Image (tube, helix red, strand yellow):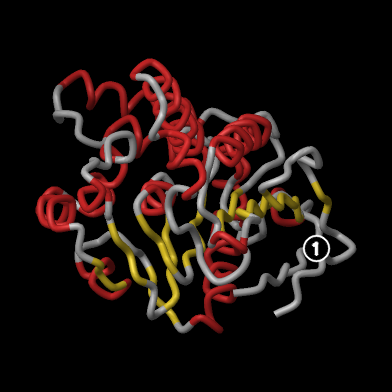
């Protein structure tokens, strides 16, 4: 597939050296761009991902983000050179390094719009964590995933909250301690992946998801993501029921809520669709 940007695509975060970031009609495409090391991450990748997602979070026109990788893999985990350097770190240096990774994962997880993971090739260790902070995960058939930390005498610490939420406690209890590889199809069977498709259908499948997202109210989409994060795991108490009633009352009173309801009743498109720019579909190399 061609990797050339279309005329409507705008490069953003031009200062990054490890990422390829482009904005196309309200959709950001953030690609790890270290194909020679299968997009393994190091402190530069962590810093640039944190910075990029902090900047994207400030963009009120943003509708969704696609997170992927150039070359043969989504992300093969930690860079070997970075791991060699860490072998000589003090406890304090290791703590600061791990905190930077934890903060990066939280920054992506907290992105106000849906983030779609585009997973192909290898997805190992921290790469599984990177996929897990995304809201929707689409993988190519044949992808292999692995939480390999125990093989190195380590543990998947900072990624654990997101990975366990994505794959479930039952699967995590197995794959954390065995460090086995597992297939995309297995990951889909326990709910970690939403879609598993042939690699040549990966971009078309993601585009279908993007089309569904941008057809919805922009503010409603953000509110729906925030709602899931707020309600997930919370006991259904009177306080929660009051909170959810408050949230729906608030959004019904917004201009977007009124417009959406009127458009539905009058059988017309809402203004966020009639005012939207024409879209193009960026293509990416698998």
Q: Which residue is mark 1?
A: 278
Residue 282 appears left or right of 71: right
| Rendered view: 50 above or below 128 | above
Frontmost residue, 263 versus 228: 228
**Left or right: 237 in relation to 199:** left
Vertical side of 116 occupied by 47: above or below: above
Of 216 and 191, which appears nearest the observer? 191
> Which residue extends farthest front?
88
Percent of width and height locating residue 90 = 38, 20
The location of residue 196, given as percent across then percent down, is 38, 75
The foreground one among 143 and 177 is 177
The front one of 257 and 127 is 127
Q: Quadrant of residue 244?
A: top left
- The x and y percentages for residue 189 are 21, 70
Quadrant of the drawing holding the C terminus: bottom right
Query: Residue 283: percent from the left, percent from the top?
Result: 70, 72
Residue occupying the point 45% across, 26% down: 97
Q: How many marks?
A: 1
Q: Residue at x 59, y 32 (%)?
A: 47
Q: Residue at x 48, y 57 (%)?
A: 75
Image quadrant in which the N terminus is located = bottom right
Q: Secondary structure at mark 1?
A: loop
Are there few (<14), some (14-19), or many (20+) residues within 10 Å of tag 1? Answer: few
Q: Quadrant of residue 280?
A: bottom right
Q: Which residue is rendered at x = 23% and y = 41% of the image?
A: 155
């Amino acid at each position: 597939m061609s990797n050339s940007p279309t005329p409507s695509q705008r490069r953003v975060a031009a200062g990054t050296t490890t990422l390829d970031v482009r904005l196309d009609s309200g959709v950001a495409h953030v690609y790890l761009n270290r194909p020679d090391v299968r997009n393994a991450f190091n402190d530069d990748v962590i810093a640039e991902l944190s910075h990029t997602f902090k900047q994207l979070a400030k963009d009120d026109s943003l509708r969704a983000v696609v997170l992927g990788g150039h070359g043969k893999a989504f992300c093969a985990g930690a860079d070997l050179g970075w791991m060699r350097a860490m072998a000589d770190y003090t406890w304090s240096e290791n703590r600061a390094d791990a905190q930077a990774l934890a903060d990066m994962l939280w920054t992506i997880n907290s992105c106000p719009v849906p983030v779609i993971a585009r997973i192909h090739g290898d997805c190992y260790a921290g790469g599984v964590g990177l996929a897990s902070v995304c809201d929707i995960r689409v993988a190519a058939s044949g992808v292999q995933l692995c939480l390999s930390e125990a093989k190195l005498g380590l543990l998947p610490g900072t990624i654990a909250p997101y990975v366990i939420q994505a794959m479930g406690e039952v699967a995590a209890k197995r794959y954390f301690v065995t460090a086995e590889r597992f297939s995309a199809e297995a990951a889909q069977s326990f709910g970690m992946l939403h879609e598993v498709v042939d690699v040549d259908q990966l971009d078309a499948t993601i585009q279908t998801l993007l089309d569904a997202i941008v057809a919805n109210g922009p503010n409603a989409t953000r509110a729906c993501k925030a709602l899931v994060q707020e309600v997930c795991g919370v006991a259904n108490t009177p306080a929660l029921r009051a909170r959810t009633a408050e949230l729906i009352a608030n959004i019904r009173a917004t201009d977007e809520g009124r417009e959406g309801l009127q458009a539905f009743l009058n059988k017309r498109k809402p203004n966020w669709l009639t005012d939207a720019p024409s879209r193009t579909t960026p293509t990416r190399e698998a």
